[in-house]
Amino acid sequence: MKKIKWSVIGAGGIADRRAIPGLLLDPRNELVAVMDMRPEEAERVAKKYNVPAFYSDAEEMLKTEKCDAVYIATPVFCHYEQAMLALKYGVNVFMEKPITLGSEEGEKLVAAFKEKGLQLTIGYMMGYHNLHVKARELVQSGGLGKLNLARMQFSCWYPEIPGAWRQKKAMGGGGCIMDLAVHCMELFTSITGEEIAEIKSFYATKTFNYEVEDSAVIAFRSESGVLGHIDVNFNIPDACSIAKLELYGTDGCIYAENTLSQVEAGKLKYIYAPQGGYDAAQDHAEGMAKTYYGKGGNMYTKQFKAFNKLLGGTPDYTNAERAVRIQKLCDEIYQ
Ligand SMILES: NC(=O)c1ccc[n+]([C@@H]2O[C@H](COP(=O)([O-])OP(=O)(O)OC[C@H]3O[C@@H](n4cnc5c(N)ncnc54)[C@H](O)[C@@H]3O)[C@@H](O)[C@H]2O)c1
């Protein structure tokens, strides 16, 4: 079995918490080096996962280690330059969401990867959740009839933290829209196969004393006319942050709870109830209902497996181009 040689840029955050453990669950992956701008973090992560080399300079690592791919998990403002640096050294890139601070940089990045024929993939892992795969099957096989309405809610408690890059506009590009709503936008497209054509939002920094928004209500319309809304907040206590994903069609609906997550958890209720005529009693008689559960798999392992399949073959920019379109929607909201 040929191993895929990986390195990591930005090893201390989500890389350590979720992505490296997910990567190493697949024996095809070999982690040869990690880099973090904080040398002690690079060393700590290297020791934790038995990685032979660690660096505090990304260029030195890319130059020294001959890797097939690099996983970039740094703050958003670093993404463009670090992905371009990897490209310079001929390394395929798997980079965390959102792609870049704005869509212009994202477009340039995708064009540069296309020109060199290297793979660029952005880490929208939630599409790999078994319940989102189920939702995709149900919607795309017509199990909801004609789709009319989408509704998503995603939140957490994120108070002021001194030095936090996500709380600075120039470093994160925005607040809960850039951090949470982008996942909802990506899931809408990946589940329904429909692009968001038009978007509007009210957003505010209501609770906390930082530069970026801590609350947003987003309304959108898809290409085929599905109407949707997304609520994202940084100011709802974690215990009350029950993530929701709902899709309603002419013949049925999907109601998923706590599936927008870093773990493959939560549940999804599917109701199939084609109605026909008007029922004046509106007694909400249930149709055929079935509940599915998260299987506890690892979405990070699955996203890296999908990426590995593309290496050595024809690059696929579907995911990166979608990430740029999501960035355009964010740009529109902030403008
Ligand atoms: N897909 C997901 O599940 C998920 C979850 C959380 C974060 N993210 C994304 O991952 C990225 C990082 O977020 P995070 O929460 O891990 O942030 P973080 O601040 O917790 O960790 C970032 C790490 O990068 C290092 N770093 C910062 N600047 C660097 C630079 N210039 N060069 C090298 N290393 C540098 C920091 O020292 C730190 O160890 C963001 O794009 C974020 O949106 C994705």
Image (tube, grey):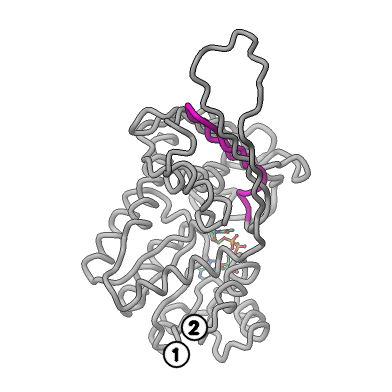
Which comes before the other along the chain, label 2 or label 1? 1
Location of the N terminus (image quadrant): bottom left
- Label 2 C-beta lies within 8 Å of the nearest ligand 1 atom: no
- Say if the magenta span includes residue 15: no
Secondary structure at badge 1 equals: loop
Disc 2 to disc 1: CB gap under 8 Å: yes
- Residue 110: quarter of image: bottom left
Q: According to the image, label 2 marks what residue? A: 28
- Where ligand 1 lies, by quadrant? bottom right
Q: Which residues are magenta?
A: 244-261
Image disc number at residue 42 = none
Q: 76 or 257: which is nearer to us?
A: 257
Side of 56 where 110 appears, left or right:
left
Residue type beneath disc 1: Met
Mark 2 is surrounded, within 10 Å at the Cα level, by few (under 14), some (14 to 19) or many (20 or more) other residues, namely some
Residue identified by numbered label 1? 1
How busy is the neighbourhood of tag 1: few (under 14 within 10 Å), some, or many (20 plus)?
A: few
| Amino acid type for the residue under numbered disc 2 | Arg
Q: Residue 193 placed where, x, y %?
A: 38, 44
x%, y% of residue 142? 43, 38
Mark 2–mark 1 distance (CA, rounded to whole Å): 7 Å
Above/below status of 220 relative to 195: above
Q: Nearer the viewer, residue 8 or 192?
A: 192
261 above or below 226? Answer: below
Could you tell me which residue is drawn at 29 percent across and 72 percent down?
Answer: 118
Query: Residue 124: where, in percent of width, then height?
Result: 49, 56
Q: Out of 244 and 100, give the one closest to the viewer.
A: 244
In the image, farthest residue toward the top: 280
The magenta stretch spans residue 253? yes
Q: Residue at x 50, y 14 (%)?
A: 277
Main SS class of the magenta portion in the image? strand
